[in-house]
Image: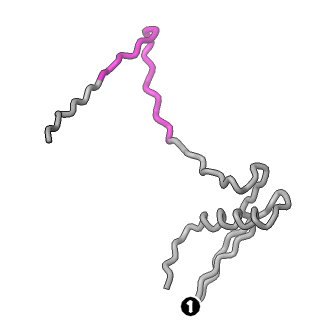
Amino acid sequence: MHHRPAILLLILVPQVGCGVLEPPIAEQPVTVAPLRNPKIPNGVSYPIVRDQEESNALSKKRMVDVRLNTKVPADVLREIALEVKKSEKHEYIGR
């Protein structure tokens, strides 16, 4: 089998301006908005108003309260619960 060598060609193009040199613009970090669950209608918001954990020697429990801005059917409520669960900061290893 014959392999051809790869060639990397880099072309530098000078910036042409009005004679005024401006400092380079600092790159801003790109923030990507999380993908919205398509099963949750766009008009529905569900901010978390309380998020706390309780634990003892045998178990750990997370309690989350969200405030819905509108009444939603059970299937949408389930999707919201799954989204809130995904926001869990800790990972737990099963027994």
Is residue 88 rendered magenta in the image? no
Q: In the figure, is residue 65 to the left or right of 23?
A: right
Which residue is at a point 60% across and 84% down the rendered structure image? Answer: 55
| Extreme residue toward the left, this view | 2
The kind of secondary structure the magenta stretch mainly shows is: loop
Going by the numbered disc 1, the residue's amino acid type is Ala
Q: In the figure, is residue 74 to the left or right of 32?
A: right
Task: Say which quarter of the image contains residue 60.
Answer: bottom right
Mark 1 Cα-neighbour bin, 10 Å: few <14, some 14–19, many ≥20: few
> Relative to residue 70, is residue 24 depicted above or below?
above
| Extreme residue toward the bottom, this view | 57
Residue 71 percent coordinates (x, y): 85, 61
Query: Which residue is nearer to you in this view: 3 or 27?
Result: 3
Query: Which residue is nearer to you in this view: 39 or 2?
Result: 2
Query: Which residue is nearer to you in this view: 7 or 19?
Result: 7
Which segment is the magenta one?
11-29
Residue 61 percent coordinates (x, y): 64, 80
Q: In the figure, is residue 2 to the left or right of 28?
A: left
> Relative to residue 74, is residue 30 depicted above or below?
above
Residue denoted by label 1: 57
> Relative to residue 8, is residue 58 depicted above or below?
below
Residue 81 percent coordinates (x, y): 69, 67
